[in-house]
Amino acid sequence: MEISLLFLINSFSFGAAFILHGAPSPLHFRGTICSGQKPLAFVSSRQHHDDDRIILHSTSGGREGSPSFPSPLGGDGTGMGSSPVGGAMVPEYKETNAIMAAEELVKVQGDTLKTWSFKSSTIERVQVLMKTEGRPLNCNLDLWEGPDNNPTRMQVYIEDANVRPFNAIFETPGAQNAVAIRNTGTMEYPLQACVVPETQDTMAASGPNSLAAQVDTLAGSVVPRTVQGGAVFTKPFDPIVQSVQILLQTDGRPMNARVELLQGPNNQKQVVELYSEDGRERPFFAIFETPGSGNVIRIVNTATLEYPLTACVEPYMIDEDFVEEGGRGGFFIVD
């Protein structure tokens, strides 16, 4: 079987042809094409070696004169709304600021500690959200499970936590869990935070919009990248990508890593240094806001060679109204 995909990229005045010939099964590829103001993203797959069908799923809801396919990103392709893909529902993706607007925020002054305790064993995970009024954010974020037991801990830095609020999910199996946020900044740099728990009942009621569904959707939709101990993995994103979802896991061994959002050479906009005692039971899942251009996610496995990790880094939300400078059609992204 041979299939050719040809797209003309006006801004560079050349064509890009992708030829798939005798590719092994299963075959998956994903892309985004932008022309003018309307991006057209797709995911294709071939499940069996003897199956000649290539299935394209449009994530922009199609355009006039072209067929419309279900969106793997949900809804109209911007990540808003749920829609079925292959019989399964995908989560309704929401902006971090929109989630925080519906929650009661607690102010954590500089050099102070705030804790949230969860005694119920029905709480499977919690979502931790933090922001500032435009000032830098520096804090230590710990998950406590009993006395003197910190199975997960992070050091977080954000240059402007109003533009790039913090959004992460902590797995909390078992009982007697607590989340501790210590603002390591001075008195002039307070932050606002909230911790949203997810119980077994709320997870069942939310269905595809639950926190667990967000993690499972990312883990099941892409092939993870293995990052050996001491290695570095980077992935750039185009300006159309407004936020990025990151999932780090191990096979049950401890996980030590540093996740950075760069915008320009060594210009760190957000840094998270994390430790998890069990990267399979307690993986790292976070959403980084990526406004503007030149955004790059850099993942450093700070452990030794014996402790590799797997990374999934994918767009979370895209700006469907994005127009490239000069108003011309734009670029092509393939994962």
Image (tube, grey):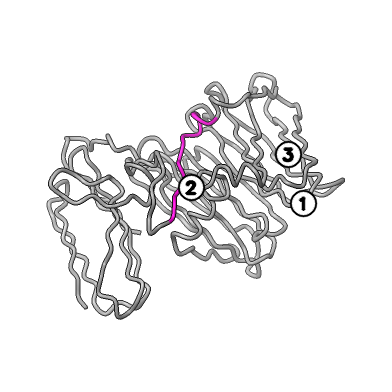
Q: Marks 2 and 3, how far apart in space?
A: 22 Å
Q: Secondary structure at mark 1?
A: loop
Q: Residue at x 62, y 40 (%)?
A: 127
Q: Marks 1 and 3, how far apart in space?
A: 14 Å
On whether residue 13 falls in the magenta region, the answer is no
CB atoms at circles 2 and 1 under 8 Å apart? Answer: no
Amino acid bearing label 3? Val
Q: Earlier in the sequence, mark 2 or mark 3?
A: 3
Q: Residue at x 49, y 43 (%)?
A: 261
Q: Earlier in the sequence, mark 2 or mark 1?
A: 1
Q: Secondary structure at mark 3?
A: strand
Q: Quadrant of residue 77?
A: top left
Label 3 CA crowd tier, 10 Å (few <14, some 14–19, many 20+): many
Label 2 CA crowd tier, 10 Å (few <14, some 14–19, many 20+): many
Q: Which residue is mark 2?
A: 245
- Relative placement, left or right, of 324 versus 24 is left
Tell me the magenta residue range.
Answer: 88-99
Q: Quadrant of residue 104?
A: top right
In the image, farthest residue toward the top? 188
- Relative placement, left or right, of 70 versus 6 is right
Q: Which residue is mark 1?
A: 174
Amino acid bearing label 1? Gly
